[in-house]
Amino acid sequence: MGLFRKKQKKPIEDIGIPETEGMISAEMSLVDAIAPSALQITSNYLQIGDKFAKTFFVITYPRFLTVNWLSPIINLDRIFNISMFIHPMDTGVILKRLRRKITQVEAQISTEMEKGKVRDPMLETARADIENLRDRLIQGTEKFFKYALYITIFEDSIDKLNEVEEEILSLMEAKMIYLRPALFQQDMGINSTLPLGTDELFIANPLNT
């Protein structure tokens, strides 16, 4: 019955491929492969490996924003991440808030008139702005939303990080846009500027189109 005798498999020979230094083993996960060598989180900045990072958010905008208002920052020859989040708001809710706000402004104007004070141009302007915005929202020509802008800068040292911070703050303040560092929230800040589409800080300002 030699015709049906099983053939013996030859043992696989070791061809002797040497292991190269730094080769990632098969057991190592992708997270282990791309993770930084060290991570330090402080109240004011992050240290990721040999890099330092700091995240800022916008706290105040001017009454009007011009076209390309962010271009001085985008064109900087620096390493940074910028993320923007637009959170739509219910028009009905905004109209109720505007109604309360205009009532407060008119009450303040009436009080000052009763006291014989000279009319306040800022109050008059505020009332006109609220009325115009309310009319446009009712007509559907305007939309209201909350807008969040975050900037994370990266540098090789704390001194360079502070230098870039002063440069960015100066450029933004020249346009009456004021930033603040995400104190005690730097980990949430950098996560909000990564390409994940997640707003962990959720520090947004109400704006209209």
Image: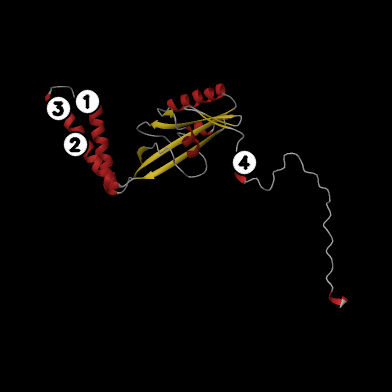
Please give left or right for residue 94 compared with residue 85 in the image.
left
Q: What residue type is labelled 1?
A: Asp
Q: Which amino acid does label 3 sit on?
A: Thr
Q: Which mark is residue 111?
A: 3
Query: Which of pointers 4 and 1 lies earlier in the amino acid sequence?
Result: 4
Secondary-structure class at tag 1: loop
- Tell me the mark number nearer the camera, choosing from 2 and 4: 4
Quadrant where the image shows the C terminus = top left
Q: Which of 66 and 151 is in front in this view?
A: 151
Q: Distance between the residues labelled 2 and 3?
A: 12 Å
- Tell me the mark number nearer the camera, choosing from 1 and 3: 3
- Residue at (21% x, 38% y) in the render: 100
- Residue at (47% x, 39% y) in the render: 192
In which quadrant of the rendered view does residue 144 lie?
A: top left
Q: Nearer the viewer, residue 39 or 50?
A: 39
Q: Which color scheme does this rendered protein use? A: secondary structure
Please give left or right for residue 34 compared with residue 84 in the image.
right
Q: How far apart are marks 4 and 3 (CA)?
A: 64 Å
Q: Name the residue under label 2.
A: 103
Q: Nearer the viewer, residue 108 or 203?
A: 203
Q: Mark 1 points at which residue?
A: 120
